[in-house]
Image (cartoon, rainbow, N blue to C red):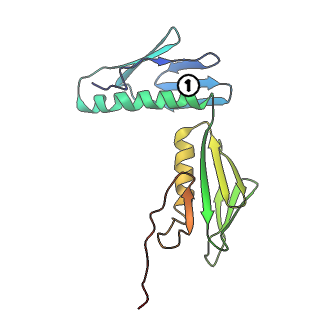
Amino acid sequence: MSRIGKQEIQIPAGVEVTQSAGVFTVKGPKGTLTKNFRDDIEIKIADKLVTLNIKRNDKFSKSLWGTYASHIKNMIQGVQTPYQKKLILEGVGFKSEVKGKEFHFALGFSHPVIVKIPEGIIATAEKNNITISGIDKELVGSFTAGIRALKKPEPYKGKGMRYDDEVIRRKQGKKTA
């Protein structure tokens, strides 16, 4: 039994939830999100509540039960208040800036690194603080992780890109005799 899946999900005022042919749509003040769900889980919408039930009692359906409930909660929360991730770029000569719908990074390579910003993402870069926000939690998280992967923080001097709340464990390095 999924503890998350068997909970009822409240639909707040100002949010409209619809489902048709496996496509789940959430409309809110910040935008609209749609997601395709398999028919292994039965999704019922009634009286400002969303309930999920499994159709078959097998391991795969049980694993999707809680996952789908989390996806629906994230969609409902995202159309009300956008998700936001912050990155900090540390290092001498490391720079970041937004030009149109592209990020331009100087990360110590022989060339600038250019990353396109996908639709649905709002990105800002002030000095070495990068803020990424959007209504889709999955898109915000994966885009932020992709940017962080360009220059991961290293443990000796702490140079690289890290999350705002991330703590980098530092190593001592060489000792001189």
- Which quadrant would residue 137 be assigned to in this image? top right
Screen quadrant of the C terminus: bottom left
Depth order, front residue of 27/106: 106
Depth order, front residue of 176/120: 176
Q: Is residue 109 above or below residue 26?
A: below
Depth order, front residue of 169/92: 169
Q: Is residue 175 above or below residue 169?
A: below
- The image shows residue 96 at horizontal and vertical percentages of 69, 63
Q: Mark 1 points at which residue?
A: 25
- The image shows residue 106 at horizontal and vertical percentages of 66, 70
Helix, strand or loop under label 1: strand
- Which quadrant would residue 135 be assigned to in this image? top right
Q: Residue at x 62, y 63 (%)?
A: 89
- The image shows residue 172 at horizontal and vertical percentages of 43, 75
Q: Is residue 83 above or below residue 54?
A: below
Instruction: Name the residue type under label 1.
Output: Thr
Q: Is residue 102 above or below residue 41?
A: below
Q: Residue furthest left?
A: 58
Screen quadrant of the N terminus: top left
Q: Residue at x 42, y 27 (%)?
A: 69
Side (left or right) of 63 relative to 153: left
- The image shows residue 126 at horizontal and vertical percentages of 73, 56
Q: Is residue 117 visible?
A: no
